[in-house]
Image (tube, helix red, strand yellow):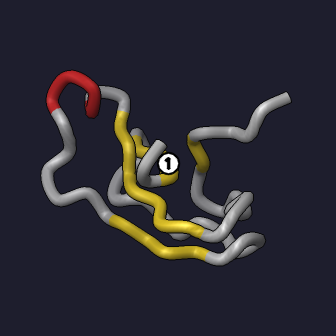
């Protein structure tokens, strides 16, 4: 099993890193001013801007 690539609010970060909001339509339209967070391994993800968004690690 590989590492998850998208995370929801309250999930724990699998690794230290910077994570960015990703949405269902981001591949087609992009997200204007997405929220970014820097977390340490084990820290919980904060709430996203809206319910359709999830967190993903930057650089992947």
| x, y percent for residue 36 | 36, 66
Q: Secondary structure at mark 1?
A: strand
Residue at the front extreme of this rendering: 59
Q: Residue at x 69, y 63 (%)?
A: 15
Q: Residue at x 58, y 58 (%)?
A: 9
Crowding at mark 1 (Cα within 10 Å: few <14, some 14-19, many 20+): many
Q: Where is 55 relative to 13, above or below?
A: above
Q: Where is 44 relative to 9, above or below?
A: below
Total marks drawn?
1
User: Which corner quadrant holds the N terminus?
Assistant: top right
Residue 48 sits in quarter: bottom left
**Seen in the image, is 14 located left or right of residue 45?**
right
Q: Residue at x 35, y 38 (%)?
A: 23
The residue at which mark 1 appears reads as 56
| x, y percent for residue 60 | 48, 42
| x, y percent for residue 26 | 27, 33
């Amino acid at each position: 099993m590989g590492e998850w690539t998208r995370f929801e609010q309250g999930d724990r970060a699998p690794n230290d890193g910077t994570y960015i909001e990703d949405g269902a339509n981001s591949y087609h339209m992009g997200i204007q001013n997405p929220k970014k967070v820097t977390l340490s391994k084990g820290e919980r993800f904060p709430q996203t801007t809206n319910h359709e968004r999830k967190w993903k690690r930057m650089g992947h």
